Image (tube, rainbow, N blue to C red):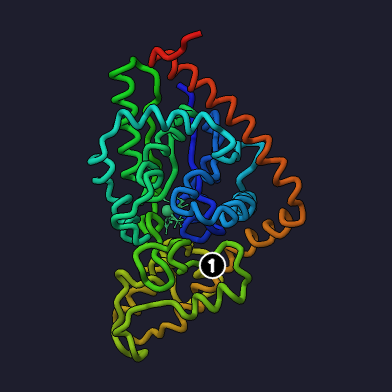
Amino acid sequence: MKKVILTGDRPTGRLHVGHYVGSLSERVKLQNSGQYDEIYIMIADAQALTDNAEHPEKVRQNIIQVALDYLACGIDPDKSTIFIQSMVPELTELTFYYMNLVTVSRVQRNPTVKAEIVQRNFEASIPVGFFCYPISQAADITAFGATHVPVGEDQMPMLEQCKEIVHKFNTVYGETLTDPQIVLPSNKACLRLPGIDGKAKMSKSLGNCIYLSDEADVVKKKIMSMFTDPNHLRVEDPGKVDGNPVFIYLEAFSRPEHFEEFLPDYKNLEELEDHYRRGGLGDVKVKKFLNNVMQAELTPIRERRKEWEARIPDVYDILKAGSAVAEKRAAETMTAVKKAMQIDYF
Ligand code: ATP
Ligand code: MG
């Protein structure tokens, strides 16, 4: 069986380090492993419009920003098909048919949708399109026959919902759609990176992000202002490591060689954590180390981004070509789906 990846991001802002550890770096690894036959990476503009209907300019502008972030991180257009969701109309068509296979109460139970409704203050005024986005995500995944979906932990309920749709479709209309599996980051700290404010999730919509495109001094400022253990007031106080964003970031980003290079007094993260727990280790020292670690990771990304920023027409060409490839593949699925559903009349 072919191994196919589908994943993507909403063009609601530039991408941040949460995206990087939760999904982007995993994609680059999978892409470069050479083990996948096809890789589709989608800029989900149609999904972004479900809760940004009144701000089409925001979505439009961020398409290029997300594409630049992809290229900066090492997504290679020769190996991965980068495309724009709205340029593949089959995805909308599939969504319409899948809607018949899902109940309203099932979508209402989706914990990510629930949390996002609260976060966006939608309450009683949820746009129908937003409510249905898990169904459209199932269309995105199945249109390409995706077998693997590398995303962050918040996407788990979406994958479950997608699998249910696949099973229902195949049961009702006959074996047509491919059952996908989620690929989560193996590092626990990367599943859901908290914001610099300590909130549960770094998110574009919450404004608590370190962006991949942030300049070095901005990154440093954000790190130095990060939320830590609020009870760790004096250096000699014992500190809490669990749930402390600075240590979660270190878990996500630091490698043994960083200690050798930037903090040779400690062999590894465990030693540093132990010292913090015991007391006698100040936040500033830990934050300075985190800054060095993150700059080492982000500097090459920032530099590559600048190179692509000087070639915007080429980036649009990549998106245009990728969208044509994606459309062709989705059309094949559409034909199979229509046949299975007996709506292939002529
Ligand atoms: P929005 O607030 O507009 O929903 P977002 O920051 O949540 O934006 P998405 O485009 O919804 O970003 O998510 C894209 C991908 O990045 C998904 O795979 C998601 O799981 C992953 N991701 C987003 N935020 C984080 C995070 N803080 N930690 C780990 N993974 C994340
Ligand atoms: Mg999101």
Q: Residue at x 47, y 68 (%)?
A: 207
**Residue 52 x/y as whole percent:** 48, 54
**Residue 164 x/y as whole percent:** 29, 31
Q: Residue furthest top?
A: 346
Q: Residue at x 48, y 24 (%)?
A: 2
Q: The residue tagged with tag 1: helix, strand or loop? A: helix
Q: In the shown orientation, is residue 114 left or right of residue 86?
A: left
Q: Is mark 1 within 8 Å of ligand 1?
A: no
Quarter of the image where one finds residue 277:
bottom left
Against 258, residue 19 (above or below) is above
Pick the residue in front: 130 or 236. Answer: 130
Against 179, residue 297 (above or below) is below
Residue 236 appears in the figure:
yes
Residue 73 appears in the figure:
no
**Residue 237 x/y as whole percent:** 30, 88
The residue at which mark 1 appears reads as 294
Q: Residue at x 48, y 67 (%)?
A: 209
Q: How many marks?
A: 1
Pick the residue in front: 338 or 293. Answer: 338
Quarter of the image where one finds residue 301:
bottom right
Tell me if mark 1 has few (under 14), some (14-19) or many (20+) residues whose alpha carbon lies within 10 angstroms of its own: many
Pick the residue in front: 186 or 195. Answer: 195
Q: Residue at x 46, y 84 (%)?
A: 284
Quarter of the image where one finds residue 131:
top left
**Residue 291 x/y as whole percent:** 53, 73
Query: Image quadrant for the N terminus?
Result: top left
Pick the residue in front: 131 or 186. Answer: 131
- Residue type for callout 1: Met
